[in-house]
Amino acid sequence: MKGIDALDKAVLQRLKDGGFYSGTKLADDLGVSRATIWKHVRRLEALGVDIVAWPGKGYRLTAPIEWLNETLILEALSPKARGLMGVLECHAVIDSTNSKLMRSLEANMPTGSVCLAEYQTAGRGRIGRSWVAPFGANVCLSLLWRFQEPAEVAGLSLAVGVILIRALSSLGLLGVSLKWPNDLLVGGAKLGGILMEMSGEAHGPSGVVIGIGINRQLPKKMMKEIDQPVIDLHSLFKGAIPGRNLLISTLLNHLLPLLEQYPNEGLSPYLDEWRSFHAHQGQAATLEVGDRRVAGRIVDINQEGLLLFEDEEGALKAYASGDVRLRPGNR
């Protein structure tokens, strides 16, 4: 699906208060047939919008949609973050916010530019995985930043993880931990993730796109279909969830100053804090690196943010990438 049209939006607007609306009522209000309403409800469901259809009552949204609002996001930015920000783009439907900014690198989009989407048709996580998020419910954010040297980027994804926890903590959410190298967890379930992509010269200026996905509100049906334990902010905040635009502004208020300072500070100021949030320190695990699988124990991270992993023979090695999976008895 390439996008949503005016009638899709009109249906969502009618349903936004959470009440039931019959197909006949919606059709009369919008000047179309009941069959047309049914078709557009199915289109919205294909985007992950959680719509209940109840015989004799009609259609209802299980949760209201807070649309991305550029004005609200900008108004809630700190003066510091606003001065560091480039272009802000809000899309209804896009293939991937990361892909959009990676394409924009060659077009000289300014540093600090942000891309947001209500829905991604090809959202991506690490190691070629897809990122699933329903329309208008979660945070799908990508941020572009330019660095003078590739070395300035070392360990950045770990520092971003620390900063995201700080941002969520400022909104009242405690108990978030980190899975190396870039997942946000609560109670072992995934709350969010970070995807970093880079383009540029081997020894020269480079552009980095930092993709951030946070589960703000996931339909129960979708949560059951995801192949790992997941959790969302709606359940953690017991329904009293921060607004989506406020959440985005809060993330940017923390992220943009980090990126400005990082070439001078590097990972060092964030290492102890990252270790304090590490969910799997000292635990038995399997590390998958490409086609290779190593069984052993997670020991620590080093000064560069590499994972220190001890295999079953006692050999300790540092890994720059890989997928960590806890072994039975450590979950």
Image: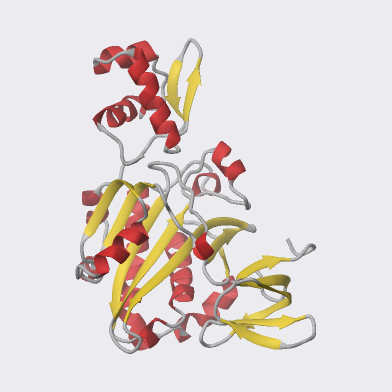
Using the image as rendered, state which of residue 207 and residue 212 is in the foreground: 207
Q: Is residue 150 visible?
A: yes
Residue located farthest toward the front when viewing the structure as drawn? 291
Determine the image quadrant of residue 5. top left
Q: Which residue is at 57% across, 60% downward? A: 185
The colouring scheme, among rainbow, by chain, secondary structure or one colour, is: secondary structure
Q: Which residue is at 31% across, 30% downward? A: 8
Using the image as rendered, state which of residue 137 and residue 314 is in the foreground: 314
Left or right for 24, reference 108: right
- Up the image or down, 286 lies above or below 250; here it is below
State the image coordinates of residue 110 (x, y, percent, origin top left). 20, 70
Q: Which residue is at 35% across, 13% downward? A: 34
Q: Is residue 80 visible?
A: no
Determine the image quadrant of residue 80. bottom left
Left or right for 226, reference 81: right
Determine the image quadrant of residue 298. bottom right
Using the image as rendered, state which of residue 233 and residue 316 is in the foreground: 316
State the image coordinates of residue 170 (x, y, percent, origin top left). 43, 61
Quadrant location of the C terminus in the rendered image: bottom right
- Up the image or down, 110 lies above or below 53; here it is below
State the image coordinates of residue 58 (x, y, percent, origin top left). 44, 16
Quadrant location of the N terminus in the rendered image: top left
- Up the image or down, 42 lies above or below 141; here it is above
**Count of numbered badges drawn on the protein:** 0
Left or right for 57, reference 9: right
Q: Which residue is at 55% across, 45% downward? A: 235
State the image coordinates of residue 46 (x, y, percent, origin top left). 44, 35
